[in-house]
Image (cartoon, coloured by chain):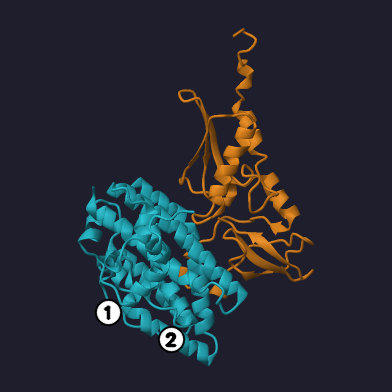
Chain colours: A cyan, B orange
Amino acid sequence: MDDAKFEYLLRQGDSALLLSQQLSQLCGKGPALEEDMALTNVALDLLGQTRMWLSYAGELEGLGRDEDRLAYLRDTRQYRNLLLVEQPNSDYAMVMARQFFFDTWHYYLMRGLLASTDARIAGIAEKSIKEVTYHLRRSGDLVVRLGDGTDISRAKMQAAVDELWTYTGEAFIYDAVDLAMVEQGVAPAAQALRDAFLQHVSEVLEEATLTMPSPDAFMQRGGKQGRHGERLGYVLAEMQSLQRAYPGVEW
Amino acid sequence: MSAMDAPPLTDTPTLDQVWAWLGEVPDPEIPVISVVDLGIVRDVAFDAASGEFVVTITPTYSGCPAMQVIAEDVEQALRTRGLARVRVREQLTPAWTTDWMSAAGKAALQGYGIAPPVQQVIDISGLSKGVKRHAIRQPDVACPHCGSIHTRLTSQFGSTPCKALYQCLDCREPFDYFKCH
């Protein structure tokens, strides 16, 4: 088995899965009906994408673990999601800033993966990018509306951007797994991806009248290698409760 | 067994016949449009080796919960026509697009009160060259009730992943718009 590719697939699947789970927790709690529907629509898209990534990972591993076993029967240290997506739903500004940073990275990554030498990964990217484009367009709109809104919404949006900024660098800090994928032509290189990310973020934040933190600021890392914050355990505990209580249950 | 008892060859339906049967399978969420008119059925083939009819379908949205129901409906529809050996397979690429929706399908959507897709999928490239968001031209979406193009987007996400919410500014009715994809 290609260990690096297995890890890489888990990273994609786990980031989509965790964000989907976090957004699902907001179902019925959105600030307006349209927002509620949008959040759950995005959650559903990300869940569908998760299935494609984790199914492929399980097949590649060849140990009989399917998408469900990978999602429901791994512990926090075995999760490979970005730290960004495990940050809490503190308020709506945090939800939208997290979404905007994620969507921007996600959009450019999927664009890069369209050219992947792995045809199945390119296929997943082709399927995902249309959905991701809608996600990014919406989250960018919300950042602008909240940033260039009232004094209170602007202050909250700026606070959220500042708070989450330290989690936006991890995706571009490549380790041996990422570099092996670049080497094989499976994944795009970090630099172009980071440049595109910073360019789009700076344009949207400017339109939102918000101040962009320094790209050279200290960036948290570790999620891709399985080192997570305490909160991930609580999210997984809720998500996995059924399979943990009734192992192997199906309906 | 006499020769008369053997099933005549004409009992094996033509691929066109199978396509026609599939054209009567409704989408579970929007029953006025068939899975063929929606562009979900990508191929029908007869596998002579196994004697199976193989129907290839592709998901609309990756998380669409209707996909499994559609696969079951397709299989069921062909079985009730007497096809014992049917296999439904899912294919991801090329990715589904609303461009594959038939003209008949679009007309049916319109009649059902859902505005059909009017433009190729959006991208964000226009947003990355200093173009302000409010200056981006939205496609003219006609109200399915009164036909006015004097409408506005109220939410990019609607009751299902494939739809957005609009409101007509003339007849004031809210309506669903089947997004370009």
Q: Which residue matches tag 1? A: A216
Can the viewer see residue A103 in this picture? Answer: no
Q: Is residue A5 above or below residue A44?
A: above
The residue sitting at the front extreme is A246
Where residue A158 is drawn, which disc sits there?
Answer: 2
Quarter assignment of residue A168: bottom left
Quarter assignment of residue B79: top right
Gap between marks 2 and 1 measured at Cα: 18 Å
Image side of residue A249 versus residue A232, left or right = right
**Residue A179 coordinates in the image, percent (x, y):** 22, 59
The residue sitting at the bottom extreme is A151
Can the viewer see residue A175 in this picture? Answer: yes
Image side of residue A67 versus residue B171, left or right = left
Q: Chain of mark 2?
A: A
Which of the pair B170/A234 is nearer the observer?
A: A234
Q: Amino acid at mark 1?
A: Asp
Q: Amino acid at mark 2?
A: Gln
